[in-house]
Image (cartoon, rainbow, N blue to C red):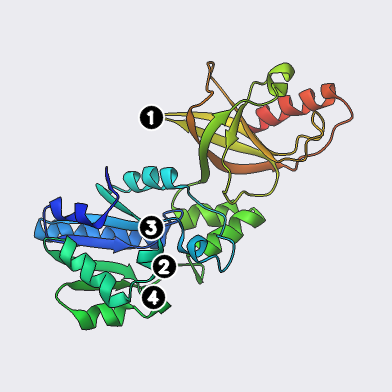
Amino acid sequence: MEVLHDLGSLGSLPGPVYLAIGIFDGVHRGHQALIEEAQADAKKTGGTAVVMTFEPHPMMFFQRAEPPLRLSSPRHKELLLERQGVTHLAVLPFEAARAGQTAEQFVGDLRAACRPLGGVVVGADWKFGKGRTGDVALLEKIGGFEVDGIPAVTLDGEVISSTAIRLAVARGDLAFVERALGRPYSVFGKVVRGSGKGRDLGFPTANVDAAGYQFPPEGVYAARARLADKTFEGIANLGIRPTVSLDPKRVLEIHLFEFSGDLYGMEIEVEFLRFIRPEKKFASVDELRAQITRDIEAVK
């Protein structure tokens, strides 16, 4: 997948260019509907489909509120989009100049950059431009390219949105989340050095730095890890590890079955497959070791 970082780069792509525009946090089924529409339009005309997103999150720029916890980091989002068959991703910096643009100016920049702009695909309720005055009706009024305002995708009567998924993750409704994403919920980060307590217990773990993510409730999970092009089944613990640590900082660690080696510094994606039990403090390390053994048998 080719990643572009400025509008000018769009001019090098075979036209017409079809843009699927949004934040795409989590790349859920609603996002996938936008992407599939842009891909279908490009295929019909021999053009190029491009997913366009923005970093940092616009809410972070305006500082009207704390940005929401993420369902996917920028790097994770790239991987998820690539799995959707996306061949071109434009990640535009969201800075003062972008924030100050009117909706008409932004569309003018898109038309000038693409050779030509074949279409824009967005959610039906998408707003953009200074004062959020731009919408699907404005895109259609400007004209000169196709406009697709994709209706919201629903699940059990609820609109699939990043907000709804975030709330479901927080309450531990992994079944809803998996159906809304079309995949198990996962977080992505680098393996960092931990305390080594897992190895001392006989169950070496990889500690994952996934700061900024929305996490499910603390506890033990059946999990799967993606390392480059390989996957490993395992068991994950999310919590403060009260039996072996006094540090209140929450830690995500995963023990991989059928794996040996050094993971430090590697990027890893951890999928939460099923909740096994809440985290608890045991009377002794031996009790904890015995429980971990039972947990692993339950997961397997």
Nearer the camera: disc 1 or disc 2: 1
**Alpha-carbon distance for marks 4 and 3?**
15 Å
Q: Position of residue 99 (x, y in %)?
A: 39, 68
> Farthest residue in the front direction?
96
- Above or below residue 179? Residue 252 is above
Marks 2 and 4 close (CB-CB < 8 Å): no
On the image, numbered disc 3 is attached to which residue? 54
- Front-lying residue, 53 or 159: 53
Asked which secondary structure carries label 3, the reply is strand
On the image, numbered disc 1 is attached to which residue? 229
Q: Which amino acid does the dot numbered 3 rest on?
A: Phe
| Residue under the image location 51 percent in, 52 percent down | 71
Q: Position of residue 259 (x, y in %)?
A: 53, 19
On the image, numbered disc 4 is attached to which residue? 130
**Alpha-carbon distance for marks 1 and 2?**
30 Å
Confirm whether residue 37 shows in the render: no
Q: Earlier in the sequence, mark 2 or mark 3?
A: 3
Asked which secondary structure carries label 1, the reply is loop
Q: Position of residue 87 (x, y in %)?
A: 24, 47
- Front-lying residue, 257 or 161: 161
Marks 4 and 3 close (CB-CB < 8 Å): no
On the image, numbered disc 2 is attached to which residue? 153
Which quadrant holds residue 46?
bottom left
